[in-house]
Amino acid sequence: MVEYPKPDDPLSRFVIGIFRVNGALMRNGDRITKAIGQSSARWHVLGQASFQPQTVASIARNVGHARQSVQRVADLLVREGLATYADNPKDKRAKLLFVTPEGEAAITQINARNAAWAADILPKLDADKLAEMSMHLEQVAAIFEKDEQEKE
């Protein structure tokens, strides 16, 4: 295991911890999706579109990625037949991304593989602490997002 620096201030320690968790989640996501020819990035985009058809910009905001990178992934998914674009009744310039039946099949496989991983990893975690951390993360995210909006 790599030894990471531990800054003195709590915000820096928090940020480093989040970066580590995010990196580990992305690597595990890539491992989970690799067997079916996908990646974490594709999972993010397909998952968002399967939840509800939406614009690339909306997906990018929801997953915290740059719109351009989500656009590249969405275009690849469309070329491969896993998703399709359709007119957006609310905005003629911004198409909606829909998941095709092939894309739904991929998401179903990914979700099954993710459920198996979760069943393996959850017993190693304290569920009550995890729920509490989730609540705190939502609060921190809201504060960071408000600060971001105020500074734009």
Image (cartoon, rainbow, N blue to C red):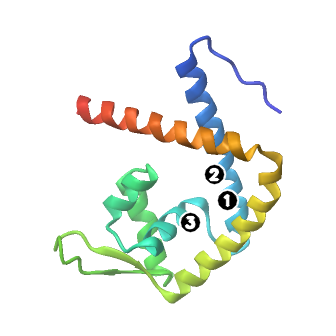
**Residue that carries the numbered disc 3 in the rendered image:** 43
Amino acid type at circle 3 is: Trp
Callout 1: SS:
helix
**Residue that carries the numbered disc 2 in the rendered image:** 26
Give the x, y percent position of residue 58.
33, 60
**Residue that carries the numbered disc 1 in the rendered image:** 30
Disc 1 residue crowd, few under 14, some 14–19, many 20+, Cα 10 Å: some
In the depicted structure, whether residue 90 falls above or below residue 10: below
Residue sticking out furthest to the front: 128
Q: Are marks 3 and 2 in contact (CB under 8 Å)?
A: no
Q: CA distance from mark 3 to mark 1?
A: 9 Å
- At horizontal 31% and vertical 35% (from top left) the residue drawn is 146
- At horizontal 57% and vertical 18% (from top left) the residue drawn is 10
Disc 2 residue crowd, few under 14, some 14–19, many 20+, Cα 10 Å: some
In the depicted structure, whether residue 86 falls above or below residue 148: below
Amino acid type at circle 2 is: Met
Q: Are marks 1 and 2 in contact (CB under 8 Å)?
A: yes
* Mark 3 or 2, nearer chain start: 2
Disc 3 residue crowd, few under 14, some 14–19, many 20+, Cα 10 Å: many
* Mark 3 or 1, nearer chain start: 1
In the depicted structure, whether residue 37 falls above or below residue 63: below
Give the x, y percent position of residue 12.
55, 21
Amino acid type at circle 1 is: Asp
Callout 2: SS:
helix
Give the x, y percent position of residue 20.
65, 36
Residue 9 shown left or right of residue 120 in the figure: left
